[in-house]
Image (cartoon, rainbow, N blue to C red):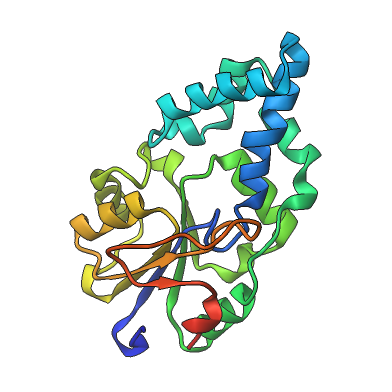
Amino acid sequence: MIDWNLIKTVLLDMDGTLLDLHYDNHFWLEYVPRRYGEKHGLSATAAKEELLGRYRKAEGTLEWYCIDYWSRQLGLDIAMLKQEVDHLIAVHPHVIEFLDALRAIRKRIVLVTNAHGKSLQLKMNKTKLGGHFDTIVCAHDLGLPKEAPEFWERLQKVEPFKGDSALLVDDSPAVLRSAQRYGIKHLLAVRKPDSRLPEKTVTGFPGISSFREVTP
């Protein structure tokens, strides 16, 4: 699926790609609504319905990924709540082997994430994955989410790469399309970002169910 002789830079998403998206799905779809409902005297169903509406309005923007934004919007300490369920943070199977194999063949490994800095720190502390990357780029530091085509131009300034020798692995079709428009040639979609949910149908991009399929 990948001719590793053509690849120099590997750009990797975090949530849903390297890490199991079950943590984030459970947190935003179950845990936050429950705690929000408790605070405002709402049933779980009513709280979830209200929050889903709010989520949809922010989807695809940097605010959607911002812990401080949601803390202000919901009147909850989101960073603290994330720690309360951090036992659910997990690395997908075969990720470590994949990263070690990339290091062995001397590819540049870059974590490129939309996650807010507080969430990124929590997950790196929990998983100890940080040492596997040559650098970590947080979209919040660049001021745009990966869904924005201009994001890749900004990434290029802090982490230079060539589109025809770069590989991006991500679970978001919107992000993959954005990267494709910018000129990143090698793109892989993750078909099973959440281990508790069925595989997603991926169209327009080659997909993987496990990093074992593409480990050098």
The spot of residue 137 in percent (x, y) is 45, 53
Q: Name the image quarter holding residue 197.
A: bottom right
Q: Residue at x 27, y 55 (%)?
A: 177
The spot of residue 24 in percent (x, y) is 62, 44
Left or right position of 23 against 207: right
Total count of labels: 0
Left or right position of 101 against 180: right
Q: Residue at x 67, y 42 (%)?
A: 26
Q: Name the image quarter holding residue 189.
A: bottom left
Front in this rendered view, residue 74 or 7 = 74
Front in this rendered view, residue 107 or 201 = 201
Quadrant of the image for the N terminus?
bottom left
The spot of residue 23 in percent (x, y) is 67, 48
Front in this rendered view, residue 98 or 192 = 192
The correct choice, above or below, for 182 with respect to 107 in the image is above
The correct choice, above or below, for 111 with respect to 148 in the image is below
The spot of residue 96 in percent (x, y) is 63, 75
Left or right position of 55 against 188: right
The correct choice, above or below, for 184 with respect to 71 in the image is below
Q: Name the image quarter holding residue 7.
A: bottom left
Q: Residue at x 65, y 19 (%)?
A: 47
The correct choice, above or below, for 102 with respect to 39 in the image is below
Q: Residue at x 46, y 82 (%)?
A: 214
In the displayed orientation, state which residue is furthest to the top: 41
Left or right position of 185 against 9: left
